[in-house]
Amino acid sequence: MLGGDLAIIRSAAESNFVFDLAKKQETFTAWGAWLGFVRKADKKFYWIDDTPLARGYTAWASAEPNSLSEKCGNMFGGRGTNVGKWNDLLCDAPSVYLKYAAVILCQKKAN
């Protein structure tokens, strides 16, 4: 096991880097790539290092986040005005949607 976490994005440059990396994956759908944030019991989003999203850079798509039941997040792929923007998404997608699933990009922890 190599270790790593889903990406934490702190700037527009990092967001662009992650999007460009995701586009290079063999499978890249409209759901783009998973991001390393989750909605906690207080109904707010936090990065996997427990930093609140509200304290830093965000790139939400228009009208997002839009559902308290969607506790995970992705960066949209595909085409349209939301490309590269963030979305709240169900953490467990039904199996029928797996062919459209977001790719998983991990960042290795610094030593």
Image: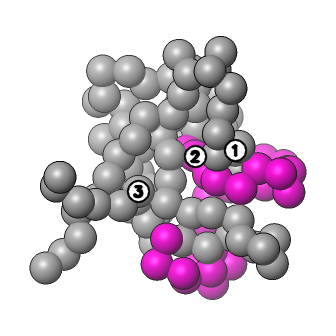
Instruction: Find out whether the residues at labels 3 and 1 contact each other: C-beta distance under 8 Å.
Output: no
Residue 89's mark?
A: 1
**Residue sitting at x 43%, y 24%:** 28
Looking at the rendering, the stretch of residues picked out in magenta corresponds to 48-75
Which residue is labeled 3 in the image?
A: 6
Residue 98 falls in image quadrant: top right
Q: Which mark, residue 74? A: 2
Q: Amino acid at mark 2?
A: Asn
Task: Tell me: 44 left or right of 84.
Answer: right
Q: Is residue 67 magenta?
A: yes
Image spot of residue 108 (x, y percent): 23, 62
> Which of these two is toward me, 85 or 51?
51
Q: Is residue 78 visible?
A: no
Depth-wise, is mark 2 or mark 3 nearer the camera? 3
Tell which circle, 2 or 3, labels the residue nearer the N-terminal end: 3
**Mark 2: secondary structure:** strand
